[in-house]
Image: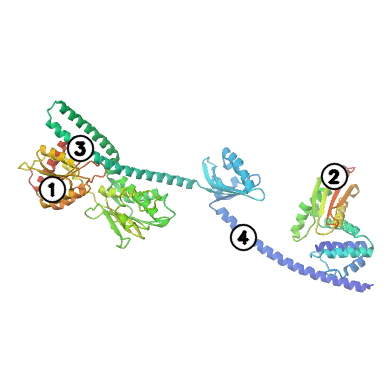
Amino acid sequence: MPTESERLRRRLEREKRAREEAERLLEAKSGELFDAAEQLRVQTTRARALAAAIEAASDGIALTDEAGVFTYMNAAHANMFGYTADELIGQPWAKLYTPAVTAMIEKDIMPGVFSSGGWRGELEGRARSGTSVAQEVVLSLRADGGLVCATRDISKRLARERETSELEARLLKAERQAALFTMGNAMAHDFNNLIAAISGYAILLKSELQEGSAQHQRVGRILEASEQAFDIVRSLEASRTEDVQKVSDIDLVQLLHTSLAITEGIRPSGIRINVDMPATARVRSNEVLLSRALVNITKNAFEAMQPEGTLSVRLGKEATAPFHGKAQRLRFGDQPGTPDFVMEIIDTGPGIPPDMLEAVFNPFTTTKAAKHESGLGLLSVKALADMKFASIELDTLPDAGTCIRILFFPRAQGLAAEAASLPFATVRPDGQIHVLVVDDDPSLGEVIVEILSRQGFTADLETNPLEALERIRSDAFHHDILVTDLTMPELSGDLLAQSVKQARPDLPVILYSGQGGYVPRDAIFADILTKPIPPERLKASIEQALHRRSLHDGNGP
Amino acid sequence: MKGMVFKFFEQHVAARLGEEALDDLLDHPGLSTGGAYTSVGNYPTSDLTCMVTTLSERTGLPVKDLLNTFGHDLFRNLAEGHSAIMAKFDDCLDMLAGIESVIHRDVRKLYNDAELPRFEVMTHERGQRIVLVYSSSRPFADLAHGLIQGALAYYGVSERAAVTRKDLSPDGTNAQFDIALLRSDAD
């Protein structure tokens, strides 16, 4: 049995151990509290940063409670619908939707949210103003039955997609129109030649028949029918040629900006655009052809470079050498003098293979992958040269890129209009005027020769323009005037005229064409006629040309 | 087990059997701490079991009765020390129904490492009857029984209360308590 003092001693020892234990626990707990406070401070800082990020996020974020009432909303979410966050917190989510959309969400979407824990899709919300808000929405179910809603306004994206789709449709339509235009020109040309031959021979035959006879009347019917056929072809041509023949003052800088804006919707995100242009650059050209060409050059460059690259657009007084003189060059529409402006559109694509270079401006030719449309776009670029609105150069270097250069020269006034105002001309004193007719279609050529012969001219036909050129070079002064068709396979009428002028600068050249589209408007022509050519119009044109030459030579009346 | 329970047990033994009996009990060589406990520490349940068993041997009282009596006093001490929590309840059955949802929730705020028994409410007829199922890793169904009786006494309804206990396991870790209150004259 322990004594009282022994018991007290033991109790004291127990109390001492208990106190020491309590102090140790207190110290440990104090350390834990400090750690917890520190952790809380870090978490609070992190939570505040997160809250600030959510508040500043461009995407909308909102929380609802179990009853579907907003308990939190960031500014982006509220602004998307034209409200402030304070105005929507405490309101049900249905406030942001029409009754029909609300019913659809409750019926079709919410059951899935509660069963799978989330939903993602697109919805049409309703802004405070009553306008619709196209939104992409992600809903997540929280443990307490409330929702986290992340949303993004996709109105602009949808509008951009629509614009891109419309633009692509417009470009496709333009390309189809260009193809039809080319085909139509070729057909018009051929039809005009045939009809011209028919009507020409009919005129000759009619003159040989007795007036008032049955045969005379029947040939008259043939001529009437021919004239109707010409009218049909002319009406078809008129609708196609009106836009592409009009010349107007154009600010190239503005046109380039517009073209880049149009193609912005189809620019792959990996392609950058560098622009180097003066404040303004005015030229006289055809706006329809030029804008179509710029859009197509840009579109082709995007497709060649995708997914990434750089498109450099430059406008200045002189050409640059983007490939340091190593590139292959293709050139159309040489013009004399110094260009007013040089526009260069340079891509960093794979370049054009050498064997494709000659064909790149032909219809239905493409250097791109098969999935893309054929390269009709460059046809409108070549048309600028064909119509003498500009000269075109194409520089390309494999694995480096392609530069399409458009050179704008000062436009000369056509002489055809001027000639119309001249007084009636006299012919040469001996009465013999030698006309060289050049047409690859013998039937039509022979008709013209026959008509000219009956009008008192001495006319020769040459069906090969190269041989015609050779005849003029070898006997420069045998002919007094050259009458030539435009479209011929060996050498076109305008190039024949240019070559002839080198040998005989004074030789008048009259050009005729059944092609209503790309008729050159060049000062070297004494007149430009359109098939069918009435015999009187042809005679007058020849006499006016000779009259003007005689005035120029100082032999005037 | 929380040191607070040990401290209440020391107070209970000292009050019922005297300081000497407590000193003798705390001198028992089987105790892991040498008999030194603080209310903020955590100690093995086996220490409490050892003390109750030793006390039973020394006094000749059954362990069951000792735990029951301790539970009775323990409830009063806990209630007096945590009056703010007790103020949340209207009556005894309301308090018993809120052991899990209110009391243990508050206990975990203070002692997040506390290993608490579960008191699952099977039936609750407000003001009349409640059926609770006690389950614990410790064999203290008798202690729980004492706590319930202490609660009835604290609210002054012992005399009109009928507690029916049904042991759900032989080791005292699971038991069902059906507590019914007879209507008082005031009702």
Q: How many marks?
A: 4
- Chain assignment, label 4: A
Q: Residues within 10 Å of mark 4 (few under 14, many from 20)?
A: few
Q: Please, is residue A87 above or below residue A210 in the view?
A: below
Residue A139 at x, y percent in the picture: 59, 48
Tag 3: amino acid: Ala
Q: Please, is residue A554 above or below residue A25 in the view?
A: above
Tag 2: amino acid: Gln
Q: Earlier in the sequence, mark 1 or mark 3?
A: 3
Q: Which mark is residue B10?
A: none
Residue at (26%, 40%) from the top-left corner? Answer: A188
Q: Please, is residue A155 above or below residue A346 in the view?
A: above
Q: How is the image coloured?
A: rainbow
Tag 1: amino acid: Leu
- Asked whether disc 1 touches disc 2, contact meaning CB atoms under 8 Å apart, the reply is no
In the rendered image, which residue does mark 2 sit on? B128
In the rendered image, which residue does mark 4 sit on? A45
For the residues tagged 1 and 2, is the chain the same?
Answer: no
- Mark 1 or 4, closer to the camera: 1
In the rendered image, which residue does mark 3 sit on? A196
For the residues tagged 1 and 4, is the chain the same?
Answer: yes
Q: Which mark is residue A507?
A: 1
Structural distance between the alpha carbons of marks 3 and 2? 118 Å
> What element does badge 2 sit on?
loop
- Chain assignment, label 2: B
